[in-house]
Amino acid sequence: MVKDNDKSSKEVKKIFNDKIRYLLNYTGSEKENEEVLCLFSKYIQYFDHALSTLMKNSHQDLQIMPPAQQTAPPQPNKAANIEGIEEVNNQGEHDPAIMIEDLVSQPPEPQLLGPQPGIVGGVTVESFMQSMVDPDENAWFQRFSKYLEGKPRAMTRIVNIYNVARGIAKVKLGNDAMANTFRMKLIVMVFLVELWPYRMSWMFQIMENALEEEDLDSLVQHSNEERNRYIGKSMVEVIQQLFSNKRSEKMTHVFSRVSLFAVYQRVARVLMHSPKHSEDEMSRDSDPQMFEHLLLEKIGDSNVVMMMSDIIPVDYVENKQTLQPFIFNMQSHMIESVSKHMENIVLHVENGESVNDKDDCKSKMLQYEYVAQYFEKAKKTN
């Protein structure tokens, strides 16, 4: 779409000019993240404008053709047709006899409107992306287009975000970034973050808190200091009690076998209601049931779904096979807001009805209360 249009090619080249070094030597620093986000914003703005123009043109093209145009061609004006035929024939391109036969025997077919697979907001997903992704990626985008709920502009943003993320991943990871499993996971993650930013903010914050608290416990232990555990459970203890029968199991090990869906169901889905204005925050997200459906989508030909280890920070994995460095569309202000809310609640893990005597962690339930209420209750008790 871009390479065949000189104006678009020049515009995109202008956007990326002088910024390519940040993409080729990307390290994930705060300064470079700001540069990439600024560049990415310009890139998205340009294609948002391009899609608006495309949709206006597509709206007219998708209308049902009048009956008069669906039947045989109107009786020709011989003088006009002969003149046209002779002009083409002089150029040596067509035989007049064949042209006349084609005009009579091949009337234009009507174009019908209506919901069809791979169409979002009247725009065909496949034709829109053919020049932007390869056939495998095209098929994946068509598969996941059902989660857009009639939002064609969201598809433009998602495709653009994916292209930027994939390009940087290829530079950083080489051929590993081009594996089908990695690319499909990256597409799913872009969908999740773009369409459900509030829920995914909690998922990222839960991961971050657990890993940082585990590191802090290790530092305290080696420094012969004591950490004041006067209030509730830490996120490490919550994850261990909900998902592991071994209290000493490392967070990286737990996250390698626990899915995003499981953590959402038992942790994020509880905590995301803790903010006073949680309803307003949740209204930013798309359909909550569709979020759970996407979390359960199978990746590739296997039965593997998205795991917590797919979003783990790169410093905590040896093979660097994580999506976290390439998630550019996560809203930083929402992450910061969730982090503040997390500091304002006390976590408790309560025993529920035992489902399986051999796996008592499944019977545990997460609960929370506000810090102020916790201390107020403690004050009255004393």
Image (tube, rainbow, N blue to C red):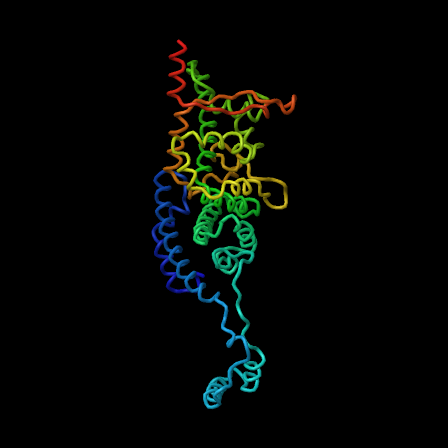
**Looking at the picture, how far across and down is residue 218, in whole percent?**
47, 20
Residue at image point 37% right, 57% down: 49
Looking at the image, which is closer to me, 52 or 43?
52
Quadrant in the picture for the C terminus: top left
Toward the viewer: 18 or 234?
234
The residue positioned 44% from the left and 42% from the top of the image is 285
In the rendered image, the vertical position of residue 356 relative to residue 199, given as above or below: above
Residue 359 coordinates in the image, percent (x, y): 63, 23
Residue at 55% across, 72% down: 109
Where residue 294 sits in the image (x, y, percent)? 54, 43
Of all residues, the one furthest to the top in this rendering is 382
Vertical side of 290 occupied by 61: above or below: below
- Give the left or right position of residue 81, taking residue 9 as reference: right
In the image, 48: left or right of 264? left
Q: Quadrant of the N terminus?
A: bottom left
Q: Is residue 169 above or below residue 311?
A: below
